[in-house]
Amino acid sequence: MNFLSRQAPATRMRRMRRDAFSRQLMQENTLTAKDLILPVFILEGSNIEQDISAMPGVKRQSLDKLFATCERCVELGIPLIDLFPADLSGKSLMAEEAYNPDGLVPRAVREIRQRFPQLGVMTDIALDPYTTHGQDGIIDDTGYVLNDITIEVLIKQALCHAEAGVHIISPSDMMDGRIAALREALEANGHDLVRIMSYSAKYASCFYGPFREAVGSAGSLGKADKKTYQMDPANSNEALHEVALDIQEGADMVMIKPGMPYLDIIRRVKDEFAVPTFAYQVSGEYAMLQGAIQNGWLERDQAILESLMAFKRAGADGILTYYAIEAAQLLQQSA
Ligand code: PBG
């Protein structure tokens, strides 16, 4: 056999991979701190930082501790934080605490806006931290979440956050028609510049488990699930339908959630609608990665950055991730 007589390949894909400079030249997607949104868990009280057992490395913080986190975001160029209240007292069937103007979330919004004028502030619109049963809405006596009554409470919650100065509200409840109702209420009350990032395609996922421990709704929810309002993981066309409705109803941005197991949905949404599209690398994804990292089964820095780059490649404009600060630090070091 004469190997040398074989024709050389016309295209050698490895040529461009040979050196760092040519690998950089042909890099198709980029990840920067500007793509990242940090979800944070906030607590009443002062000088408190609590571990979350299923999310090692993430802490629930009282507001004074949160300010240090905000400062870090500003330093690193992370544009937005997303507030989730944890372990609230005053839970009720009708979730009245959700629109208490002196509640934890509106207070946090006012203080962050005042101290960190350049940082974007987003809040979650849903009732699960405020209901005794841990569902995202108001229930009837069979436990079914009532759509239209829930929307009335969500409107009050959104207006309360808007009065406090929130930049973006992020409805994560999956009620039908809530984007139109919230948009109309914001317009009617002088908050036409409040942006809406809709959890448009939110699946009924087991990957939210650690989050429910973090906010303290797991116990209230018990064995109940959210399948009568969150989507079936088997579905893909339904996600496009949801996104179409939310855009039509006035959403500025749409979100797909969870993230990594649903990259196909991100790609379809981006291709179909070409609107600002976001992905949520949820608590269970964090738990999986962090568990493997802590066991030494995955290399930390690459696991974090590769998992986030995948969202950019799938078409996401930005990513909600509990790794936002770590990732921004890594990106800063490699720049
Ligand atoms: C509540 C809400 C959830 C998450 C964000 N907002 C949990 C749920 O729907 O049960 C999950 C976030 C995460 O898992 O990181 N409406």
Image (cartoon, rainbow, N blue to C red):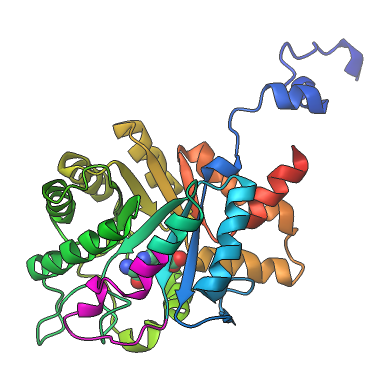
- Residue 57 appears anywhere in the view: yes
**Which residues are the magenta region?**
87-109
| Rendered residue at 64%/49% (across/down) | 75
Q: Nearer the viewer, residue 75 or 16?
A: 75
Q: Position of residue 284 (x, y in %)?
A: 50, 68
Quadrant containing the C terminus is top right
Name the quarter where the N terminus is drawn. Answer: top right
Q: Residue at x 34, y 62 (%)?
A: 124
Residue 261: x %, y % from top left: 46, 55
Q: Which residue is at 55% across, 58% downward?
A: 70
Q: Choose between 176 and 32: the one closer to the eye.
A: 32
Residue 280, x across and y down, in percent: 44, 55
Quadrant containing ligand 1 reads bottom left
Residue 297 is inside the magenta segment: no
166 left or right of 50 in image: left
Residue 174 visible, this angle: no
Q: Give the percent coordinates (x, y) of residue 210.
A: 48, 75
In the image, is 31 to the left or to the right of 280?
Answer: right
* Position of residue 216 in the picture relative to residue 49 (left or right): left
